[in-house]
Amino acid sequence: MSDTLSESLRERATCIFELEQIASTLHKRIEKHQASGRTLTLKVKFADYQQITRSKTLLMPIKELGEIIGGAMRKPPLRERAI
């Protein structure tokens, strides 16, 4: 799943809120399709067009919303610049 925001985010709290919204959408899709996976990948594109990717593979399938959010927040790539 990929999502592009219409404007750059500057506040950490706003970034976390958007991440939670994306995680919620992903969780709904997982439930709808009765799917699961073990790898969670987060790609962040900064306002200066630089991008970074973080990936985490777990031993057990990821099915719960808290696991998605926790996995995405484990190594937050959010620095003090707009994304």
Image (tube, rainbow, N blue to C red):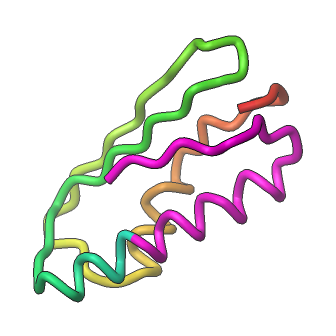
Q: Quadrant of residue 21?
A: bottom right
Left or right: 44 in relation to 36: right
- Magenta residues span 1-25
Say if 75 sits above or below 60 in the image.
above
Say if 52 sits above or below 73 in the image.
above
Say if 14 sits above or below 59 in the image.
above
Q: Quadrant of residue 34?
A: bottom left
Furthest residue toward front: 6
Q: What x and y, as percent, mark residue 1?
A: 31, 53
Q: How many marks?
A: 0
Using the image as rendered, state which of residue 52 and residue 9 is in the foreground: 9
Q: Does 32 appear in magenta?
A: no
Q: What x and y, as percent, mark residue 7?
A: 75, 39
Taking the spot 33% from the left edge, 40% from the top edge, the residue there is 55
Using the image as rendered, state which of residue 19 and residue 57 is in the foreground: 19
Q: What x and y, as percent, mark residue 66?
A: 46, 80
Left or right: 39 in relation to 66: left
Furthest residue toward right: 11
Left or right: 5 in relation to 24: right
Q: What x and y, as percent, mark residue 72?
A: 48, 55
Taking the spot 14% from the left edge, 65% from the top edge, the residue there is 37
Taking the spot 16% from the left edge, 61% from the top edge, the residue there is 38
Quadrant that contains the C terminus: top right
Q: Does 11 appear in magenta?
A: yes
Taking the spot 70% from the left edge, 59% from the top edge, the residue there is 16
